[in-house]
Amino acid sequence: MMEPQPMPKEITKEDAERIYASAIMAVERRDYHRAEDLGREAIQIYETLRIETLEDAVARHNRIGRVPIPELMHEGVVRARLRQYGIRI
């Protein structure tokens, strides 16, 4: 008899916000490759979450570590913020 497998962890907006903050911290360390990878991961999560309304886009955090989180968060915000540092995703 097969053992039951653990359920995969549900991906949340909090995960996306943490990954976004990690991307910004990577930029601050000048680790642009890592920032791009993290940015892509955050974008993928937001796309999976299908943010469609203002209510959907409201951020759960206002700051993670030293990184301010915009009031409304979705994949377009991640792209725009990273673009400010020359990272095009």
Image (spheres, rainbow, N blue to C red):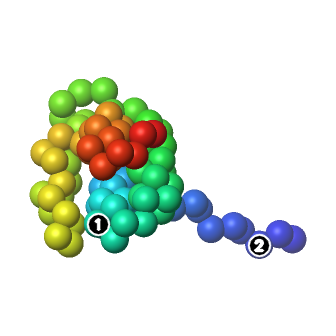
Q: Are marks 1 and 2 in contact (CB under 8 Å)?
A: no
Residue highlighted by disc 2: 3
Q: Residue at x 29, y 38 (%)?
A: 80
Report the front residue among 43 and 84.
84
Q: Residue at x 71, y 68 (%)?
A: 4
Q: Nearer the viewer, mark 1 or mark 2?
A: 1
Residue 84 seen in this snapshot: yes
Residue drawn at 77 percent across, 72 percent down: 3
Q: Position of residue 33 (x, y in %)?
A: 49, 59
At a point 83% along the width and 69% down the height, the residue shown is 2
Task: Locate residue 67 relative to residue 36 in the image: left or right.
Answer: left
Q: In the rendered image, which quarter contains the C terminus?
A: top left
Q: Which mark is residue 28?
A: 1
> Can residue 15 be seen?
no
Q: Secondary structure at mark 2?
A: loop
> Where is residue 23, by image quadrant?
bottom left
Q: Residue 21: percent from the left, percent from the top?
A: 29, 61
Tell me which amino acid carries mark 1. Glu
Give the structural element (helix, strand or loop) at label 1.
helix
Q: Is residue 25 left or right of residue 9?
A: left
**Where in the figure is residue 45, as x and y percent of width and height?**
44, 46
When asked about the image quadrant of residue 5, the answer is: bottom right
